[in-house]
Image: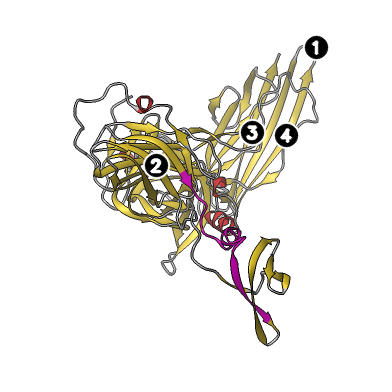
């Protein structure tokens, strides 16, 4: 079995010519051609670099319909086609149709699965497809007939087409030169000129061995395809457990359809070099693989290199200019979740490069807490599956009529198993926090300052609420809590957290004093 990777330059036709027949041969070949191990069909592996927050498939579909390049789609696919091809005995040409319009010809590989002696001498990628503009260009110098509306009647104009551009047709007729607007005119042409195609086509000049119908495997990369993950969570009435469903949204603007394809998705940031004027580096997709057991209505997942590979265990139709949703995994029920109300006045503040001694620098106001829902992505919590990056939406049942109501959404990054998933849903309506600095002292000579805060939480709900207050001690790295009303948890070298319950329709205050030295 021999494989040829073809390196080409982009022009109207892409051509590579082997310098000699021997140059195309694999150094070490088996004594006899191996029997084919593949069957006819198509397999697609789709890589995505889409931002789950800003990726809107409809925007790309509308842009493609407007004539914009599908290379802007944030992703790509590796297409593998196994097909019966009539291989010539000796030198001959083979046309391979139905390839993607946005194929990267430099990535094409060719393998004759039945005869290792078959060699590729030359390749052309022809994409000069039939269109009204292309047809008119090809008819320059030939006779055409136009039916031109003239009020309530139609005038027929026949002549040699001299030019066709800027919406004007220039004809040489027996009455002289006529310039006719192409808009509204009906054009009668003869036979289709040679060289125009209805489908993108790879043309190979082959040096065949015995010839005949052989199974041939062709692999290439195409732009215009991508995918994203979407998740739906439904909370129970107590906000203690939930159910989860996952979906893949697959978009195909590659310029080809793939009926009955085997589909794979790669999750992870796979580096590629983007061939554009910006010269940007893009990102999309060892150990023995571990396969996650799933039923037939979801993808099978396994570790693949440093990424994760999701394989759909059934064939699916991936049609041109379409989006489709496929279940990522079977629904997961009754896994544990945790709801928290979090106050974080100092979010985004880190420790400065020098002590902050300005007494007027303080953070304090009245605000609402963020509503956070989290869960452990572990096997003992009915989960434990790698979750591709995507948008996660949360719903809750309205007990009065049983309908599901939307309560918030967030984005998650690629999340391995055994990690915690945190989702911010919004801000609580009936819980309010107020942060006030009550004291500040500084001894510049002694390089010491103290700061005291009072944080009051008011709960107007009819049930108790658990809250967490996160405090970042941003004035300097050396600090000590000299007084506190409640115990705290040290989260890192400059962050502490207070956790407590606020009674229904009640309030509770936390105070602490921090001493900085330098």
3D distance between C-alphas at marks 3 and 4: 10 Å
Q: Is residue 141 magenta?
A: yes
Label located before the other in sequence (4 or 1): 4
Q: Position of residue 504 (x, y in %)?
A: 54, 52
Name the residue located 50 percent from the left edge and 56 percent from the top edge: 196
Determine if residue 425 is in view.
yes
Q: Position of residue 335 (x, y in %)?
A: 35, 46
Q: Which mark is residue 288?
A: none
3D distance between C-alphas at marks 3 and 2: 78 Å
Q: Position of residue 358 (x, y in %)?
A: 80, 25
Q: Nearer the viewer, mark 4 or mark 2?
A: 2
Q: Badge 2 local density, few (<14 within 10 Å), some, or many (20+)?
A: many
Is residue 70 depicted above or below 416 in this figure?
below
Q: Which residue is mark 1?
A: 445
Label located before the other in sequence (1 or 2): 2
Q: Which residue is mark 3?
A: 511
Is residue 503 depicted above or below 146 in this figure?
above
Q: Which residues lie in the magenta part? A: 125-149
Q: How is the image coloured?
A: secondary structure
Label located before the other in sequence (4 or 2): 2
Q: Is residue 262 magenta?
A: no
Identify the image quadrant of the N terminus: top left
Secondary structure at badge 2 equals: strand
Q: Position of residue 166 (x, y in %)?
A: 71, 61
3D distance between C-alphas at marks 1 and 3: 27 Å
Q: Which residue is mark 2?
A: 204
Label located before the other in sequence (3 or 2): 2
Q: Which residue is mark 4?
A: 437
Identify the image quadrant of the C terminus: top right
Are dots 1 and 3 in contact, CB under 8 Å? no
């Amino acid at each position: 079995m021999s494989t040829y990777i073809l390196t080409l330059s982009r022009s109207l036709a892409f051509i590579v010519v082997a310098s000699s027949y021997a140059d195309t041969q694999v150094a070490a070949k088996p004594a006899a051609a191996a029997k084919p191990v593949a069957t006819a069909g198509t397999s697609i592996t789709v890589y995505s670099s889409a931002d789950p927050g800003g990726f809107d498939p409809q925007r790309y579909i509308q842009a493609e319909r407007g004539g914009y390049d599908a290379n802007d789609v944030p992703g790509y696919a590796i297409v593998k086609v196994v097909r019966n091809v009539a291989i010539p005995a000796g030198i001959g040409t083979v046309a391979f149709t139905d390839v993607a319009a946005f194929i990267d010809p430099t990535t094409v590989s060719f393998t004759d699965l039945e005869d290792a002696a078959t060699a590729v001498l030359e390749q052309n990628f022809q994409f000069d497809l039939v269109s009204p503009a292309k047809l008119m260009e090809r008819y320059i110098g030939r006779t055409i007939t136009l039916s031109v509306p003239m009020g309530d009647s139609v005038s027929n104009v026949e002549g040699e087409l001299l030019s066709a551009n800027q919406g004007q047709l220039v004809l040489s007729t027996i009455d002289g030169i006529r310039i006719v607007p192409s808009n509204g005119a009906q054009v009668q042409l003869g036979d289709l000129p040679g060289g125009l195609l209805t489908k993108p086509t790879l043309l190979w000049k082959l040096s065949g061995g015995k010839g005949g119908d052989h199974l041939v495997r062709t692999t290439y990369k195409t732009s215009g395809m991508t995918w994203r993950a979407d998740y739906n969570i439904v909370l129970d009435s107590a906000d203690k457990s939930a159910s989860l469903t996952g979906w893949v949204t697959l978009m195909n603007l590659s310029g080809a359809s793939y009926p009955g394809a085997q589909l794979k998705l790669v999750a992870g940031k796979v580096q590629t070099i983007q061939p554009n004027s910006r010269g940007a580096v893009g990102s999309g997709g060892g150990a023995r693989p571990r396969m996650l057991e799933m039923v037939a209505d979801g993808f099978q997942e396994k570790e693949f290199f440093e990424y994760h590979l999701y394989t759909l265990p059934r064939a699916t139709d991936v049609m041109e200019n379409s989006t489709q949703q496929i279940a990522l995994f079977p629904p997961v029920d009754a896994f544990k979740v945790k709801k928290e109300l979090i106050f974080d006045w100092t979010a985004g503040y880190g420790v400065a490069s020098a002590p902050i001694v300005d007494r007027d620098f303080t953070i304090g106001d009245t605000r609402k807490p963020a509503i956070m829902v989290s869960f452990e992505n572990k096997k003992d919590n009915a989960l434990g599956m790698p979750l591709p990056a995507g948008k996660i939406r949360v719903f809750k049942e309205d007990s009065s009529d049983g309908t599901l109501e939307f309560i918030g959404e967030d984005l998650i990054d690629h999340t391995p198993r055994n990690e915690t998933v945190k989702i911010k849903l919004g801000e609580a309506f009936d819980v309010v926090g107020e942060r006030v600095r009550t004291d500040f002292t500084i001894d510049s000579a002694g390089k010491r300052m103290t700061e005291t805060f009072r944080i009051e939480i008011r709960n107007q709900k009819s049930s108790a609420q658990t809250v967490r207050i996160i405090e970042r001690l941003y004035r300097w790295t050396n600090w000590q809590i000299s007084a506190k009303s409640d115990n705290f948890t040290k989260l890192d070298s400059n962050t502490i957290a207070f956790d407590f319950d606020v009674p229904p329709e009640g309030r509770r205050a936390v105070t602490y004093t921090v001493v900085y030295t330098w």
